[in-house]
Amino acid sequence: MTYDLNNKVVLITGSTGGLGRAAATALRARGARLALLDLDLAAAQDQARALGEPDVAFAWQTNVCSLESLEEGFAAVERHFGRIDVVIANAGIGNTAPLETLTESAFERTIDVNLNGVFRTFKAALPHVKATQGYLLAVSSMAAFVNAPLNSHYAASKAGVLAMCNSLRVELKHQGIDIGTIHPTFFKTPMMDALMDSHCSNLVFNRYQGIWKFVELEDVVNKLVDGIAKRRKLITAPSQLALIARAPGLLRPLVELIGFNKQRVKQAVQLSIEDAGNKK
């Protein structure tokens, strides 16, 4: 079944980055209305103006390292469009370093943006997508499955995103909310440009030749848009990497079917909410 994107309100964090900008353009071409959230308000406003009138593109300044900032952003989008159907947790950072030189602050910063930022985004999104039985998509990476040296902090953040989404998918299923993760390999963005001359680029990834070669940004975006339209659980770019991505979780659907009764999960969520309310 295809999820019609025409007039759906799609919220994107990190909207002015390479993938965010290209995804916004492609989604607008499919008729989606866009909420563009980014740290750089001026850039997001320019992006919104380029995509159309205020009734189809809206910009707001948001920091994914602050739940309060995200909640304010989501509320602003709700006031502007009246609903939120799809949320893409796209904001992310990346750099390379061996453990010997990797600082505690750099590790924590990567986890805070790439993993905690997705948690905060989905936390802020939940009241809104409950109302629309919407779709949440987290931008992960093939680094969630193929853990390269000099990338321990980045790999940990992206693998954490995958695990978190696998857990939330079962938890939120009874509410009609679907959750997906997209796992691209290397593609050209300003973030990747900054890494091109690193030792990791030159040596570990053989200057992105052979199996590490770049895929086209257009291919990644097409997979992302198609994944949203089909509310997919797992999206890879390119498609040939699907087997690598799916192999670790081949038994997961069976375990979820046997081990997690839908009604009991629903009851557990409700009782936990009630317990939290009683403690206030």
Image (cartoon, rainbow, N blue to C red):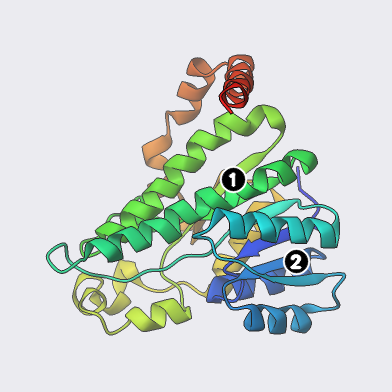
Disc 2: which residue: 34
Q: Nearer the viewer, residue 115 or 152?
A: 115
* Mark carried by residue 1: none
Tell me the quadrant of the picture where the N terminus can be found.
top right
Residue 17 quadrant? bottom right
Q: Left or right: where does residue 121 sit relative to residue 102?
A: right
Q: Amino acid at mark 2?
A: Leu
Seen at 75% across and 66% down, the residue is 34
Mark 1 sits on what residue?
123
The amino acid on which the numbered mark 1 sits, given as a three-letter code, is Lys
- x%, y% of residue 112? 41, 57
Q: Residues within 10 Å of mark 1 (few under 14, many from 20)?
A: some
Name the foreground residue: 17 vs 267: 267
Residue 212 in view of the camera: yes
**In the rendered image, is residue 7 in sight?**
no
The C terminus, quarter of image: top right
The residue tagged with tag 1: helix, strand or loop? Answer: helix
